[in-house]
Amino acid sequence: MTTLAPGQTIGILGDGQLGRMMAIAAAELGFKTHIFGQEKNSPAAQVANANTIADYTDKVALRKFASSVDVVTLEFENIPTDTLNFLSPLIPVRPGRKVLEITQDRHLEKSFVNSLGVPTAPFANVESLEELRQAVERIGTPAILKTRRDGYDGKGQVKINSATEIDKAWETLGGKASILEGFVPFELEISIVAARDIHGNVATYCPVENRHKNHILDVTIAPANILSTVSEHATELATKIVQNLDLVGLVAVEMFVARDGDVLVNELAPRPHNSGHWTIEACTTSQFRQSIRAAAGLSLGDPTAHSNALMRNLIGDDADHWNDILQHPEMSLHLYGKTESRPGRKMGHVTRLFPLNVPPKV
Ligand code: AMP
């Protein structure tokens, strides 16, 4: 099993802000990074040692990339699985192809989660309008129709409030293979970032609460204000998932907490996650250092939080107020080096710490 030593190079597939913060963490640990992405002067490439700009299907570029790095990891789960198939015989890829196959497809992902005895909202696979009608009959309304692949930040999904909205919903998603999911009247949304090393050891961060605005994460409150029994249960579920995914790296497990304390898993992301950015300031080992340690085949660090934290995303022109934020010395500002601000685009984030006995104020 390959383990890296300082000075060696970690290849990262994907070039956004997650790759940027992974590359910074890698540099802190003495590693070099090589980013493989599509954008010139991308957030990740700005802080890395090398950059390949090429399509994920470009075999010549992939072969050259593989020969210039010591291990490959990723910051984005929608890398084509063929890319990983091509790279795997050449270089260790962590996490591997099987993990992406499951997490790129909502139906496979939810079926995998249920196969572990871990609950999700009720769901049905839908490949035609007729199947959607049958699914609505079985699951009832309200329900949410989600494309099986390529959905994020609320894209590729539509709520169905009553049977009269079925045709419109099917049309809105372009008749793509989808799942219909029962609507969960949750009390709050939480997530847990779990890490697993090459030997199978697991480390989990505490559950955090996530609040969204326009389907995009707005704030993360660490830790989530839930009963310790709920927190322990959610952590057990996340641990079961990371162990059975057989993954080397991180997985963020997004969950719904119902009023009665029931926990349902919504989604998995096999990489550092926006809801884990608070760990940079508040934990002994940040999620980014943890992902680099796992990818490098090293032992995991301590995920314990030494502070509570509030993380707020800077979306679109929120980031224009960077100088106002800097007037508050208690705020830790992170900007991702994106030159063009667009509505809904994640431009940066701000973290504020609180003592462990003080709940973060939103
Ligand atoms: P997703 O893309 O699956 O993470 O969904 C994006 C957001 O939509 C979630 O964070 C929830 O706020 C909401 N959502 C998704 N699925 C459901 C559901 N089954 N019931 C209620 N709300 C949901």
Image: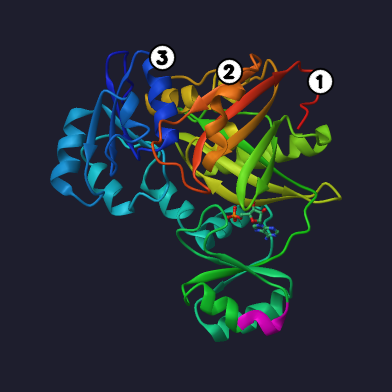
Mark number displayed over residue 84? none
Q: Is residue 103 left or right of residue 261?
A: left
Residue bearing mark 3: 28
Residue type marked 1:
Val
Residue 235 percent across, percent down from the top left: 68, 36
Q: Is residue 338 left or right of residue 38?
A: right
Residue shown at 72%/74% (left/top)? 161
Marked residue nearer the N-terminal end (3 or 2): 3
Image vertical order of residue 288 relative to residue 150, above or below:
above
* Foreground pick, 229 / 208: 208
* Foreground pick, 167 / 77: 167
Disc 2, SS: loop
Residue type marked 3:
Glu
Q: Are marks 3 and 2 in contact (CB under 8 Å)?
A: no
Residue bearing mark 1: 358
Mark number displayed over residue 302? 2
Numbered range of the magenta stretch? 162-166
Q: Is mark 3 within 8 Å of ligand 1?
A: no
Which secondary structure type mostly characterizes the magenta part of the structure?
A: helix
